[in-house]
């Protein structure tokens, strides 16, 4: 599966731009604030009908304009899909081959994307919420039921915490029991899925990192579950033991919302001891592991989006990355042609002031 072309009208700093993509590698070179990341954002938007920057739809419309549109052709097997998305100040419409789609998730089912941005380094540097979000997004890409389970869990957790905060209901104990029964059932499902997929990503990423470092660095992802259990009954028992604390603190103290994924290099925390370059390599190898997982689990080949990917990577690491992207459509942005001397010039385009050109 790959993206054949894309037309942007009033998207970010693009007034009108038509882009033809190669089936394999596509590299876009430009200075900062010229539109490189905006181009990747437009590809992401075509696949998800939302931005990876978690902003309002109207914020992607070009300044002083009232509407935006994206039109792209996706090839999957022998068939072509014509995707069109239009956004105004008050509305958004999605259609595929002229058929209107009412929900973003229907569009997402068409194809898979794996995205790397420089902000991914925060996954290592910051707290556990970003690492939980990382693994959740990866699982959602290969397990359709996971997103609903996680959404239902978050909703119930919010309601349980609200109940604990006030504790003035006539049926407080009964309501708490009902919440706990459903919350632990969902929590146990999420725990098992995280445990399984962290293990898979760990294995794939470890292999990539070993190859990259010539066997000198062992990258490891370890699931640090707040509740470890071999059965639902055991999970429920551990959860219930914190009820007195829950009542006192008026907040749920145990569960998957307290999980973490520990990332180490040679048994040392990457957050504390790895260099910036090592951290970037670790995250890139986790993204490569995500690509491999999607292929193994769904037989789909993900489209890969890498923003400013060569920054702080030496020539060896850059070459390793490009070698492991073979066989996938990849759209890469960079600020210069360093490490790209061996890349076919037909694969390289240049971006300046929202305009794209070949050399």
Image (tube, grey):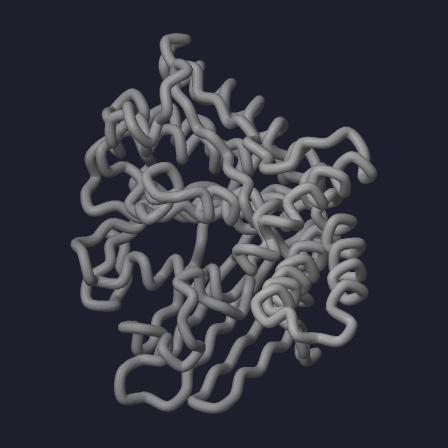
User: Residue drawn 56% across and 31% down?
Assistant: 223
> Looking at this view, is 284 or 126 the one in front?
126
Q: Is residue 148 above or below residue 314?
A: below
Determine which quarter of the picture holds residue 34: bottom left
Residue 299 x, y percent position in the rendering: 70, 39
Q: Is residue 262 above or below residue 35?
A: above
Determine which quarter of the picture holds residue 32: bottom left
**Residue 201 as seen in the image, left or right of residue 31:** right
- Count of numbered tags: 0
> Looking at this view, is 318 or 168 the one in front?
168
Residue 168 x, y percent position in the rendering: 66, 74
**Residue 180 as seen in the image, left or right of residue 249:** right
User: Residue drawn 35% across and 71% down?
Assistant: 17
User: Residue drawn 68% across and 63% down?
Assistant: 156
> Looking at this view, is 105 or 226 the one in front?
226
| Residue 299 shows up from this direction | no
Residue 167 x, y percent position in the rendering: 64, 69
Determine which quarter of the picture holds residue 56: bottom left
């Amino acid at each position: 599966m790959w993206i054949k072309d894309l037309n942007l009208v009033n998207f970010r700093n693009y007034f009108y731009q038509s882009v033809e993509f190669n089936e394999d590698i596509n590299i876009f070179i430009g200075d900062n604030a010229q539109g490189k990341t905006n181009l990747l954002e437009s590809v992401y938007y075509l696949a998800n009908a939302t931005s990876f920057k978690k902003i309002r739809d109207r914020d992607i419309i070009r300044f002083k304009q009232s509407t935006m549109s994206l039109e792209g052709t996706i090839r999957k097997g022998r068939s072509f899909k014509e995707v069109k998305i239009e956004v105004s100040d008050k509305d958004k419409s999605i259609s595929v081959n002229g058929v209107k789609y009412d929900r973003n998730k229907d569009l997402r089912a068409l194809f898979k994307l794996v995205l790397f941005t420089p902000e991914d380094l925060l996954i290592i540097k910051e707290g556990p919420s970003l690492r939980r979000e990382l693994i959740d997004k990866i699982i959602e890409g290969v397990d359709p039921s996971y997103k609903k389970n996680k959404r239902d869990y978050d909703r119930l957790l919010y309601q349980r915490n609200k109940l604990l905060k006030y504790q003035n209901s006539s049926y407080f104990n009964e309501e708490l029991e009902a919440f706990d029964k459903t919350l632990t059932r969902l929590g146990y499902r999420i725990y098992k899925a995280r445990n399984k997929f962290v293990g898979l990503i760990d294995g794939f990423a470890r292999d990539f990192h070993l190859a990259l470092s010539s066997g000198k660095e062992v990258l490891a992802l370890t699931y640090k579950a707040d509740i470890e259990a071999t059965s639902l009954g055991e999970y429920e028992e551990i959860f219930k033991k914190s009820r007195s604390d829950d009542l006192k603190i008026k907040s749920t103290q145990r569960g998957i919302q307290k999980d973490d994924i520990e990332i180490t290099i040679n048994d040392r925390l990457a957050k504390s001891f790895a260099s910036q370059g090592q951290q970037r390599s670790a995250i890139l190898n986790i993204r490569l592991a995500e690509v491999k997982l999607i292929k193994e689990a769904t037989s789909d080949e993900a489209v890969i989006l890498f923003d400013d990917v060569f920054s702080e990577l030496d020539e060896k690491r850059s070459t390793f990355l490009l070698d492991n992207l073979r066989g996938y459509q990849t759209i890469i942005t960079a600020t210069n042609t360093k490490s790209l001397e061996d890349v076919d010039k037909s694969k390289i385009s240049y971006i300046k002031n929202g305009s794209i050109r070949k050399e």
